[in-house]
Image (cartoon, helix red, strand yellow):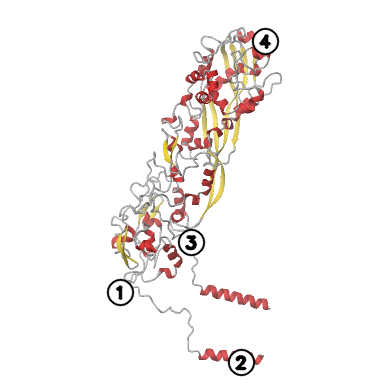
Amino acid sequence: MKRMIMFAIAVLAISIFVLPVTLSLFSGQHRWYNISPQENQIPCKKCHADVYEEMMNMEPLSKKIAGQSNSPHSYMDENCELCHRTCFNMTYNPSTGKYEKFPGFTYASGKDEGSIPGVEAHAASTIECMDCHGIPMDAKYWNHWGYEEYKGRCFLCHGGTGYYRGKFITVPFRGYSNFISAGGFGFGTTSNDTGERAAHKQFVLDSIINPDMEDANEACIACHTKIQVKLNFNVTSSLMISVNDTYNQSASYWNVANISPGGYITYKEVKEG
Amino acid sequence: MKKIIVLILFIGVASLTLFASTEVISLFVGQHSFINISDEGNQISCVGCHHHIEDELNHSMIHADLSCEACHRFNGTTDITFASGDRSGSIPGEEAHAAYTPRCLDCHGGNGVWIVNKTGSSVHAPPAKAFGEEHYGSNYSAHKTLVLKANVSNTCIGENEACLVCHTNYSCRISYSYFYNIDYNISNWNISSFSFDGTRNYDIQWNKSGAKHEFLKLSDIKCTKCHKNVYDALVNGTSNPSNEDYLTHAPVEIDSTGSNNSWDTDNPWGHYRYHYIPDANRAERVNNNYCFRCHNVNKYASEHSSENATYDLGNVTDDTNSTEVHCSEALTCAICHGSGRTKEVIDNPDYGGSGHNETIPDFVDEVASNYARTFSGDICMGCHEAAVHPDDGGEECSRCHNNGNAAVNIQSEPSGYVTNTA
């Protein structure tokens, strides 16, 4: 038995020794992407296939190619950089309660012969929904129509004509002014954005403070995407009312002195994806 | 030993699998599955986050036929511009984004509004009588101060606290404070002295499910739940073994029936007493209808044709302000029983002495004019509680009926105990 084992080990050792093929860890690591053409050559979906799949499931591809999708995000399926390398940068100012314009980030780029080192971000940034949806208008602040990532791709947001997946398509026109503003919270996204009656404003304000996502994104995606949401509600179920009879000999009235919450009930909600 | 080898082998394989895995573990899965909102109507499910409210509405007697949007994206009278992505463009919200918290009076103010329900039918949201008018209507509405206070309170939007506390299963606790008793002397139907004393604190708790979206039908709004002190006074009062219980809020006409039998039977005018309820019927009959007999005569008359004819309630309604109130009128006895009123005090045809019939100035009007509303009813009850009226007649009869003399001490609800002496 021992002889057999010794023999097997010897054969195995000789086999490995004479094997002409090199076993390589991380094969392909020396096949570099050429990033000097204008468009992004690094496939985001290689690592983010799950995100790509979500984007592709929004609308049938045939509908998008036919230019029949009214959902701007549906055309971002393989145009990640429109959002994640955006030039827009809106930041909430708690003291004014409004979103304000700030210069966009400098992303790393290898376009043409030289290169631009990234500053605030390298390949991509985690964006705030309000970077795009909080803008009243560009007004030549970012000059986004000249931004490298956006050149020739106006139709993907504004509607119009252009190439999508190699096909020349026409997307329903969506307009240029206030066409994606998330108005109604009083954040100054349009000149008429007062938000004075908004039911969910506190949800948005609390989301801005919450560190789990950028800015108000928790609130935005909770409603506008199919993400699962678990909510713990604690709501008033009772009022406490103090009523004092106020009187002298000749006159009286019932003074409702105070109305305040008198009790709460708690319950959980789960919004399925 | 074998177990250890197997364990090491398992850990090794698991590590290699994890190391070689190309799967990305993603946080917040679904955040890139945007909901297409470009079709007509609302594609973002309110119920997704608000199942609980949907359940409440499914158990509601009113509004169960309405969608969330019918109320919370209502712009018929509010002129709110809500955010919308319908069709290829979009409308940015202005006053609200997805939804607003409505004031009940947005739909129930003015003349009410027409809204489309879940089945596509137009339904009318009726106006809230009086409270839906400018400045919440007349000052005769008993609950107007509640609405005014609700409007400046912060628990709900607008006046909604007041609406919800009566019209939904929102629970409430009410803490009342008012006088404990009054003392007064009457000499020849003139009040010669008057004083009030003490403070009575009375707390009620109307426990309901707590659901703000479970709206009640009108008949399920129980006056006596919030006014339990009045209910307790009317049903229980203070025990008086020798006669009737002391029951404030249930005055009797003073007539011969009291001395011969009890106060429970017909009065000398040939019909059942309007206010007084026999002992056996109190728990059953002290209900909304009983309250409306005085506090909303117009409503009571319109819903009770037989009583309307018997008690001439059409004319009584004209004496009251009940057509101008939301549900209940704040009143004094003089509204119906003052000089020149349909139910002006009249003399008892079966008994001697004129009482305060035809006193100049009118005794009932004098009480209402010179004493606070909170006291005036109890001043009347000092004589008109069944329990306080003596059975034996004789000298005692002439003290009041001929001379108009009395020294009265009466407690407020719910005890209502009275002493009426010379």
Local packing at callout 2 (Cα closer than 10 Å; few below 14, some 14-19, many 20+) is few
Foreground mark, 1 or 4, reads: 4
Vertical comparison of B11 with A272: above or below: below
Local packing at callout 3 (Cα closer than 10 Å; few below 14, some 14-19, many 20+) is some
Local packing at callout 1 (Cα closer than 10 Å; few below 14, some 14-19, many 20+) is few
Q: Kindly state the secondary structure of the residue where label 1 is placed.
A: loop
Q: Kindly state the secondary structure of the residue where label 4 is placed.
A: loop
Query: Which residue is depicted at the point 68% across and 23% down?
Result: B239
Local packing at callout 4 (Cα closer than 10 Å; few below 14, some 14-19, many 20+) is few
On residue A113, the disc is 1
Q: Are marks 2 and 4 in contact (CB under 8 Å)?
A: no
Q: At label 2, which amino acid type do we have?
A: Phe
Vertical comparison of B351 with B419: above or below: above
Q: Label 4 lies in what chain? A: B
Q: At label 4, which amino acid type do we have?
A: Gly
Q: Earlier in the sequence, mark 2 or mark 1?
A: 2
Q: At label 3, which amino acid type do we have?
A: Val
Q: Label 2 lies in what chain? A: A
On residue A16, the disc is none
Q: Quadrant of the C terminus of chain B?
A: top right
Find the distance from the CA under tag 2 to the CA under tag 4: 134 Å
Find the distance from the CA under tag 2 to the CA under tag 1: 60 Å
Q: Are marks 1 and 4 on the same chain?
A: no
Find the distance from the CA under tag 1 to the CA under tag 3: 38 Å
Q: Are marks 1 and 3 in contact (CB under 8 Å)?
A: no
- Reading the image, the residue beneath label 3 is B29
